Every structure is written in C-alpha cells, then in structure tokens.
Image (cartoon, helix red, strand yellow):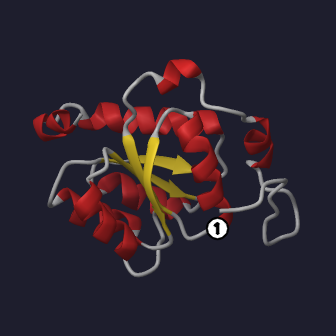
Amino acid sequence: MGSGGALSSSFGCECWFAGECAAMTETPESQQAEVPFCVAVAEDEAELREYYQKVLPHLGYQIVGIFENGEELVQHCFQSMPHVIVCDVDLQRLSGPESVKLIRSRHPVAAVYVTENRFEDVTAEKVNRAVVLKKPFSMSDLEQAIAQAIATNSNSSNFNEMI
C-alpha cells in the first residue's frame, strides 16, 4: 500500500488518522488466538484504503480485499463471502448500498457505510440494515461500528451459519 510515515491528504495537511497508524505495532496476542471475522473494504480514497490495511488487522479482523469501487467489491465478495463489508457510500460504478444489496442477494453480510455527507447518512440507514460511520472517525469508532453491524446481523440465521 504505502511506504509508511505520516500520510498527507490532498489538502497538504496530515490526515486525521495518521497518528493512530503510527502508534500501532503488532496485533495483540489475545486477538491473534481468535478466529477473525473476514472483512472486505471498498473505498475510493487511497489514504483511507491504506488506513484500513493497517487498522483492521490490528483490531483482529482478516482482510479479504480492499477495492476502489463497488463493482470490484461485488465481484470479489461473490467468491470470498466475507462476514463484514466496510464501504464508502459514494463509490464509483456501484454505490456502497447498491453493492451491499447485490452481495446480500447471494449471502448474508454485515455492513458499515462510511460517509461524510449527512444526506447520505439518512439514505444509507434506510437501505440494507447497515451501520453508518461518519468521517472523520477514530480506530475506536471503526471498531464499534463493525461490532454493531455484526450484532445487528447476528439475528439472521444465515449470518450465524457463516461464522
């Protein structure tokens, strides 16, 4: 993904998440012993894709793929069947909610929609039982959103068969 160091945004300032990435070392042993949930990510911002690449394993999740658009996410998820999808609401080719709807037509999956637009928040909440995470967010916010998405979908017998 990247060569490390501080990440810069297109505005020339340090990203809001750069400090968290720099503070992380290895995944704690307590998390390594558990069988991780598999997560697929779709994000059009390169810096956030790099952030997810570093943070998700640290939180104990196994990444099955990180993609730039909804179409790539859907194609991959039809084969890999992740437990959780973390995706931007406003993606190229297919939006986050459209992508999740297609994936859920084949198998159950928990979803976290990431957005910075308040109008998108309302739309995302109405579509596909998903948790909405607003930018900027912390590693703790991401962890809570994924846990909430898993809990929301754990009532589905199809979802429980996957884990």
Position of residue 109 measured from the top left corner of the image (x, y, whole percent): 27, 48
Camera-side residue: 83 or 93? 83
Camera-side residue: 58 or 118? 58
> Is residue 29 shown left or right of residue 106?
right
> Is residue 95 shown left or right of residue 100?
right
Q: Quadrant of residue 25?
A: top right
Q: Quadrant of the N terminus?
A: bottom right
Q: Residue at x 61, y 43 (%)?
A: 55
Residue where numbered disc 1 is placed: 46
Q: Residue at x 32, y 66 (%)?
A: 76
Q: Quadrant of residue 62?
A: top left
Q: Residue at x 23, y 63 (%)?
A: 78
Image vertical order of residue 100 relative to residue 145, above or below: below
Residue farthest toward the bottom in the current orientation of the protein: 93
Residue farthest toward the top in the current orientation of the protein: 30
Q: Quadrant of residue 113?
A: bottom left
Position of residue 80 measured from the top left corner of the image (x, y, whole percent): 28, 56
Q: Amino acid at mark 1?
A: Ala
State whether residue 79 appears in this view.
yes
Q: Quadrant of the C terminus?
A: top left
> Is residue 16 shown left or right of residue 33?
right
Position of residue 88 measured from the top left corner of the image (x, y, whole percent): 49, 62
Image vertical order of residue 10 relative to residue 3, above or below: below
Image vertical order of residue 127 relative to residue 140, above or below: below
Q: Secondary structure at mark 1?
A: helix
State whether residue 98 appears in this view.
no
Q: Residue at x 39, y 65 (%)?
A: 96
Position of residue 137 measured from the top left corner of the image (x, y, whole percent): 64, 45
